Image (cartoon, grey):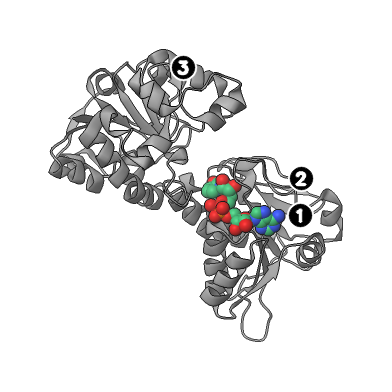
Amino acid sequence: MRVGVPTEIKRHEYRVGLTPTAVREYRVSGHEVIVQKGAGGGIGADDAEYVRAGARIVDTADEIFATADMVVKVKEPQPSEWIKLREEQILFTYLHLAPDPEQTKGLLNSGCTAVAYETVADENGGLPLLAPMSEVAGRLSIEAAATAMKRCNGGRGLLLGGVPGVKPARVTILGGGIVGTHAARMAVGLGAEVTILDRSIPRLRQLDELFSGRARTLFSTAESLESEVLDSDVVIGAVLVPGASAPRLVTREMLKAMRRGAVLVDVAIDQGGCFETSRATSHDEPTYEVDGIVHYCVANMPGAVPLTSSYALNNATLPVGLALAAGGIEAILGNRLLRSGLNIHKGRLTCSPVAESLNLPFLPPEQALAA
Ligand SMILES: NC(=O)c1ccc[n+]([C@@H]2O[C@H](COP(=O)([O-])OP(=O)(O)OC[C@H]3O[C@@H](n4cnc5c(N)ncnc54)[C@H](O)[C@@H]3O)[C@@H](O)[C@H]2O)c1
């Protein structure tokens, strides 16, 4: 199969669909790989590195879309890319179609077969192609908090770990899933005083074992949450209720009783945010203040570290992408990961939550692929 990697064109997107390491794996498996000139620039991988990995460099995205059997990207295709996609062509990337009727229409009209990273589900319902970005965002959330906590950035002027003789900052993490766990690891590593709240007792047990007393765990109730938040220097929002908007756990009223210059990092902003006062921000201007509390609400946090993020993403996407490249569209039905990832096939919507959100007709993957 010919696999094509265009340069990402979304603003501030520096990641790349295939790293040189992944290109080499595709080549070893017998596939041809074409990469758009400069596609790896954002991760410091130049064209020569791609050529060494076995890719052929092409000048334009047009050549990729016109000749590749499978296009591998990171972000959802932009309008100028929808029109280049073709029937019989496979698109493998993040799509996030549920809130995006325009893109959905564009992909349906193209006739392509689109497998979305974010809906690829394993046998336990886990989302293996989303997990690496949660790991990155969780770790980054503490770096973001440390920066925002500096006085010159509006924060209280606290060093997260303190110094001998001066107490460290109190970090409260709402949600002890992937983001929350990785945030806690960073905060504990820096010497902060860390508390993790979650509503899942099994998860709290795992966290208790994992941190061996270096982070406190608390069952999340309205009362425990409010008392921890009011006593915090940093609050990380990392909750997720699958398929739903994030619950608004920290109200505007609570901000008034918090310490001036405390920092809220809402990682769950991509699901609407778990603080009442959250609104999505970008890497250009990541923070703003409400009632003297600094808010960091960047919706695509992993984009800040494209090198780490691209490699972490490729580690997760590689086996799934290789299975898709090996078997083509015919492989989708027999492969649970690919089947759950199939969102669109030849003008039909095959992902029921997306169809429900957009009020569009849904056809199960089995029927769409058989048609
Ligand atoms: N901003 C970004 O760039 C970025 C990047 C990656 C992930 N995210 C988002 O971060 C959020 C967390 O992702 P994740 O992978 O850690 O999810 P996860 O499912 O692994 O963890 C979520 C945790 O929240 C807990 N939870 C649910 N309701 C709760 C409540 N009321 N109180 C306390 N805990 C509660 C769940 O029990 C679970 O343990 C998601 O919204 C995800 O989309 C954002």
Q: Decide: is 332 above or below 290.
A: above
Mark 2 CB in 8 Å range of ligand 1?
A: no
Q: Is residue 29 left or right of residue 368?
A: left
Q: Which residue is mark 2?
A: 277
Secondary element at tag 3: helix
Name the residue nearer the viewer: 146 or 366.
366
Q: Decide: is 79 above or below 190.
A: above
User: Which residue is at the far bottom?
Assistant: 165
First in residue order: circle 3 vs circle 2: 3
First in residue order: circle 3 vs circle 1: 3
Looking at the image, can residue 358 be seen? yes
Secondary element at tag 1: strand
Disc 1 from disc 2: Cα separation: 10 Å
Q: Which residue is mark 1?
A: 293
Q: Which residue is mark 3?
A: 106
Disc 3 from disc 1: Cα separation: 41 Å
Nearer mark to the viewer, of 3 and 2:
3
Disc 3 from disc 2: Cα separation: 34 Å
Residue 233 x %, y %:
72, 65
Q: Are marks 1 and 2 in contact (CB under 8 Å)?
A: yes
Specify the amino acid type for callout 2.
Thr
State the quadrant of the C terminus.
top left
Q: Quadrant of residue 86?
A: top left
Residue 112 x %, y %:
36, 20
